[in-house]
Image (spheres, rainbow, N blue to C red):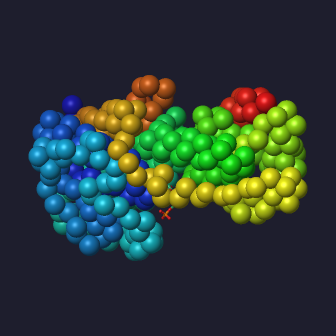
Amino acid sequence: MTENKIRRIGVMTSGGDAPGMNAAIRAVVRSGLYHGFEVYGIQRGYEGLLDGGISEMNNHSVSNIINRGGTILKTARSKVFNTPDGVQRGKAMAEIFRLDAIVVIGGDGSFRGARDLHRVGVPVIGIPATIDNDIGCSDYTIGYDTAMNTVKEAIDRIKDTAYSHERCSVVEVMGRNAGFIAINCGIAGGAEACIIPEKEFDVGEDIIKPILSCRNAGKNHYIVINAEGVGGTMEIAEQIRQKTGISTNTTILGHLQRGGSPTVRDRVAASLMGAKATQLLSQGIYGRVVAMKGEGVVDYDIEAALEMKKEIDEHLIHTSKILSLY
Ligand code: F6P
């Protein structure tokens, strides 16, 4: 057996923060130390890799963080790193700090950065973390469950006031170009209509019609979920107002969806994937992305992982329509 040359590893969070990133950092640090690695925290994602914002972590540095949203390592979307020169500078800094491998916790943009480092010979492992759940290789991404629970709570509150005033509320949820949060929260929030980027829609057919058929059956409060990737939330509300005469307001939930204490599901997924990352490194395996497949943790070649696609289940879309009937 060849000797494992990995002794010292770096860990970073990159891209949009997601609840559970801290649980993943904790898992990488503690399981990394368990495997005998020295573990270094890289601040502000690839920005910290470029400017040497790198310092050693120990078991105590990750104490009392599993319950906290955000990321203690901070995060950024680095434009500078996203160039061939940036990648070479990142590699050079990894060599200065003698990092033998880097664990990147983040979304698809962060994984592209990790792949670029991998291509220039820096050993990497990716851990999927984004509230959008839009990483093709993983059934589940860290932060998704917490964000959905936050959205569900917001819809419940909006529903109380929509019911009392007999109004329609159009709620815009995050997800970038993906509708995973929207479709699931549409079902969980009992929405009359749910619009996602993956599915073409017609305002008359898919929004006005279900609202009017509910009204004709005696209902007088309505929730419409619109995914941010669709956009035009104000215009949709205006059309509802004009075509139905129903008092209609809008709520764009925005960044409140990214904060908050992570749910059990996010903490456990983050812990399992963080531990898997260092287990792979302890076996001298890198250039991988760890991922959830059902309840289990798997890993894929990073190049292949970035090519993988994940669709929204048609059955979810169909069911959301059936269940909005009144
Ligand atoms: O990827 C997570 C996410 O919250 C998306 O849902 C959203 O489109 C984007 O990040 C917002 O990014 P920023 O925080 O940079 O405005």
Name the residue at the top extreme: 295
**How many numbered circles are shown?**
0
* Residue 157 on image: x %, y %: 55, 44
Can you see residue 190? yes
* Residue 38 on image: x %, y %: 13, 48
Q: Nearer the viewer, residue 54 or 153?
A: 153
Can you see residue 123? no
Q: Nearer the viewer, residue 189 or 257?
A: 189
In the displayed structure, would residue 260 be above or below residue 98? above
User: Is 89 left or right of 320, judged from the image as shown?
Assistant: left
User: Is 214 left or right of 269, judged from the image as shown?
Assistant: right
* Residue 169 on image: x %, y %: 68, 51
Give the residue at x 88% y 56%. 243
Q: Nearer the viewer, residue 106 or 92?
A: 106
Q: Nearer the viewer, residue 192 or 15?
A: 192
Q: Considering the image in quadrants, where does the C terminus appear?
A: top right
Give the residue at x 11% y 46%. 60
Give the residue at x 60% y 42%. 160
Q: Considering the image in quadrants, where does the N terminus appear?
A: top left
User: Is 31 left or right of 79, judged from the image as shown?
Assistant: left
* Residue 182 on image: x %, y %: 62, 45
Give the residue at x 23% y 46%. 65
